[in-house]
Amino acid sequence: MCELLSNAKGTAPGMLFQRDGVRYVSMPGVPYEMKHLMEVHVLPRMRAESDAHIEHRFFMVQGIPESELAGRISDWESALPEGLSLAYLPSPGIVKLRVTARTQSPEEAEALLEPATEGLRAVLGTDIYSEDWKTIEEVVGERLAAAGQTVSTAESCTGGSIAALLTRVPGSSRYVLGGIVAYANEVKMRNLGVNEADLLMHGAVSEPVVRAMARGARKRFGSDWGVASSGVAGPDGGSAKKPVGTVWLAVSGPGVEWAGRFQMGDNRERTVRKSVLEVLNRLRGFLPEAPAKH
């Protein structure tokens, strides 16, 4: 026996088979179509026929390696009561923590989850940038909009990826003024006011240069905040002092002049992705929290 599962996100339906008391589900291969069928057809049936109640809470953390994060929360994790479990869901630059309650009712799940999640917040504090699946660019955008402030970008090794991520958010024109991709040193000097002497003495991938780039973006666009990147994304171009993956990032804003050096690894795409997330998360840390929405 086969039951077709309608697919509102595409043309290929899912199929539900039953044989000897066991059900098998065939799903389309496109991820967002498969997710749709799971949410609309499969999971509701499983919930309806199960005596168990399963509930999740998610915590998004940026810039802390999974092993380091595990060490920081090991005492908290070891104290989790029966019925709660923790999963690490890592991706480049981000770790999602999923706390799951398996109980007989929503009320039991709530009673377990609330004290446990409060404990996790106490351990990680502001290293948690979101608890509701919001992206880092959405969180930064909310804070900028709530504060009535603006941002501009000056990018070398990230090649416009910071600006691209910020402007993925609908309504970002309220707070993103513009950006400059300053790959060449001449562009850094002409458009961002980087001092030639700093370039000659320290090189493009250096603290003085990236600081000047962030300040130059603010001045060029008249924004409240400027963020900047300069690094060796690879696969070549590294040296003993500045190996592939070396990245300098900077944030300039009201009362803030921050810069930091990072080693992002030898994969070019990962270096760019991790650099973008890192500098946006640093900016988030300097912005006031947006008012909670009720």
Image (cartoon, rainbow, N blue to C red):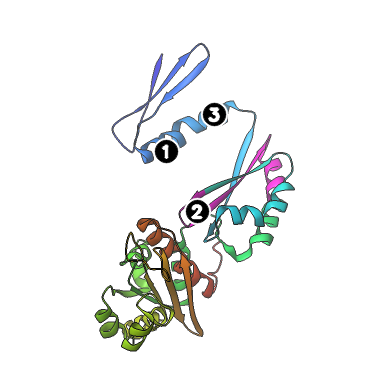
Q: Residue at x 70, y 56 (%)?
A: 119
Q: Amino acid at mark 3?
A: Met
Which label is found at residue 133? 2
Q: Earlier in the sequence, mark 2 or mark 1?
A: 1
Q: Amino acid at mark 1?
A: Lys
Instruction: Please provide percent x and percent y for residue 176.
Output: 36, 72
Q: Tell me whether circle 2 and circle 1 mark residues in contact (CB < 8 Å).
A: no
Reply yes or no: does residue 179 show up in magenta. Answer: no
Instruction: Please provide percent x and percent y for residue 192.
Output: 31, 83
Q: Tell me whether circle 1 and circle 3 mark residues in contact (CB < 8 Å).
A: no
Q: Residue at x 63, y 64 (%)?
A: 125
**Farthest-out residue, top:** 20
Mark 2–mark 1 Cα distance, whole angstroms, equals 16 Å
Relative horizontal placement of residue 57, taking residue 180 as reference (left or right): right
Q: Nearer the viewer, mark 1 or mark 3?
A: 1
Q: Quadrant of the N terminus?
A: top left
Instruction: Please provide percent x and percent y for residue 207.
Output: 43, 79
Residue 262 in the image: above or below residue 23: below
Q: How many callouts does the rendering have? A: 3
Quadrant in which residue 160 is drawn: bottom left
Crowding near pointer 3: few (<14 within 10 Å), some, many (20+)? few
Look at mark 3 in the image and give the residue it sits on: 46
SS assignment at label 2: loop
Q: Quadrant of the C terminus?
A: bottom right
Q: Nearer the viewer, residue 90 or 204?
A: 204
Relative horizontal placement of residue 132, taking residue 121 as reference (left or right): left
Relative horizontal placement of residue 45, taking residue 4 as reference (left or right): right
Which label is found at residue 35? 1
Residue range (magenta): 90-114
Q: Tell me whether circle 3 and circle 2 mark residues in contact (CB < 8 Å).
A: no
Q: Earlier in the sequence, mark 3 or mark 2?
A: 3
Q: Residue at x 41, y 63 (%)?
A: 245
